[in-house]
Image (spheres, rainbow, N blue to C red):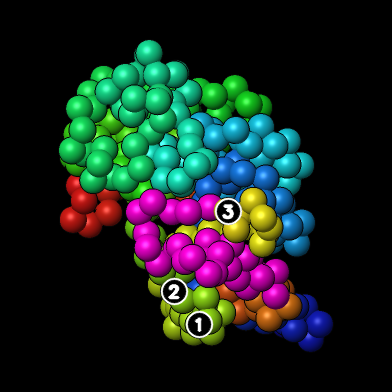
Amino acid sequence: MKIKPLLFIIVLLYHTGLRAENNCPKLLLRLDDNGMNHSVVMAIKQVAETGIPFSTSVMFTCPWYQEAVAVLEKFPNVSVGVHLVLNSEWKYYRWGPVLGKSAVPSLVDKDGYFLASTDEFLAGRYKLDEVEKELTAQIERAQQSGLVIDYVDYHMSTAVSTPELRAIVEKLAKRYDLGISRYFGEDYDTMFDVSVETKSDEFFRRLAKLTGDNVNLLVMHVALDTPEMEALIDMNDAEMHSETKPLVAMHRSAELNILLSEKFQEMVRKGAVKLVTYKDLVRDIGLEKMKAPPGED
C-alpha cells in the first residue's frame, strides 16, 4: 500500500519530533523556600507567570506560607511539595514548629524556635517521636491548604541527616502517598554555592552539558531584591553574609533573573531542554519505584 506524500511527511515529522523529545535533556527545576517571606513568594509567582512547568517546595512552618498557597492555586503548571523544616537559619527572622514549643520541646531552643544548623540539631536532645509528630503536622497543614501536594523534600537536609530521621520521612511519604525528591533517580545539582558574578554563565554551561539519559534535578533559590531580603543574615553560611553587600538578596535575585531571562525562556520554547515536574515523575515512574539516592539508603 502506498502512503500519500502529505501523510508520509506528517508521519516523518511526528517520529522525528518524538526522537528529538526523547533525546532532549529533561530538566526538573525545584524552587525552594517558597513561603519563607513575601519576596520569595513574589519571585516564584513571576516564574510561574511565564507558564513554564516547575516544582516548588513550600515551608509550611513560615508566616508567608498562606500567601504562597494563594498564589500557587492559580498555576496548574507548578507541582507543589512540602519543604520539611527542622531548622531556622536567619538571624532576627526565626520560625518554629507548627505544633508549638510545648508539643515538641526537644526540637526548639529556649524561645521556641528551630535551631539554626543541622549540626546544632543533631547535637541536641531531639526525640524521634517529636520529629515524626512535627513533620506529620507540616504535611497535614499542606494538605489542608487545598493545594495538591505531589512530594516532600527537606530543608537543609536535616530531616534525612541520619538513617533514623530518613526512615521517618520515608514512612510519612508512604502514609500520605507522596513522592520524595531525589528518590526517582534524578541527577542532583544546585546553584546555591555558585558566585553571583558567575552564576548565569555557569547555569547555561551546565545546561549545555546535560544529556537525555536521566532527569536532571536543579535546585534553585529565587527572590526579589528587596529590603526584606537585604536584611537577612545567614547564621550558617559566611559566604551569604557581608557587612557591605546584601549577598542573600544578590544570590537569589540573580537566580530569579536567570529563569526569567529571554535566553532561558527561548531554550524552553525551542525544546533545547524538556522541563518536567515531580507531578510528572510520580505519574510516569510511580511511587512504588522510589529509592533513596545511592549511598543514602
Specify the farthest residue to the right: 6
Q: Quadrant of residue 265?
A: bottom right
| Residue closer to the observer: 211 or 104 | 104
Q: Amino acid at mark 2?
A: Val
Picture coordinates of residue 281, whole percent (x, y): 48, 51
Look at the image and tell me whether residue 252 can be seen: no
Tag 2 and tag 3, C-beta contact below 8 Å: no
Specify the farthest residue to the top: 102
Q: Which residue is mark 3?
A: 231
Above or below, 230 against 213 in this view is: above
Tag 1 and tag 2, C-beta contact below 8 Å: yes
Q: Nearer the viewer, mark 2 or mark 3?
A: 3
Q: Residue at point 65% right, 76% down?
A: 264
Please give left or right for residue 237 compared with residue 43 in the image: left
Picture coordinates of residue 157, whole percent (x, y): 33, 47
Picture coordinates of residue 100, whole percent (x, y): 44, 18
**Helix, strand or loop at mark 2:** loop
| Residue closer to the observer: 286 or 133 | 133
Q: Nearer the viewer, mark 3 or mark 1?
A: 3
Magenta stretch containing residue 259, yes or no?
A: yes
Q: Residue at point 40% right, 24% down?
A: 112
Structural distance between the alpha carbons of marks 1 and 2 = 7 Å
- Identify the magenta region: 232-261
Structural distance between the alpha carbons of marks 3 and 1 = 23 Å
Q: Quadrant of residue 49?
A: bottom right
Q: Which residue is mark 1?
A: 198
Q: Which residue is mark 2?
A: 194
**Helix, strand or loop at mark 1:** loop
Which class describes the residues within 10 Å of circle 2: few (<14), some (14-19), or many (20+)? few
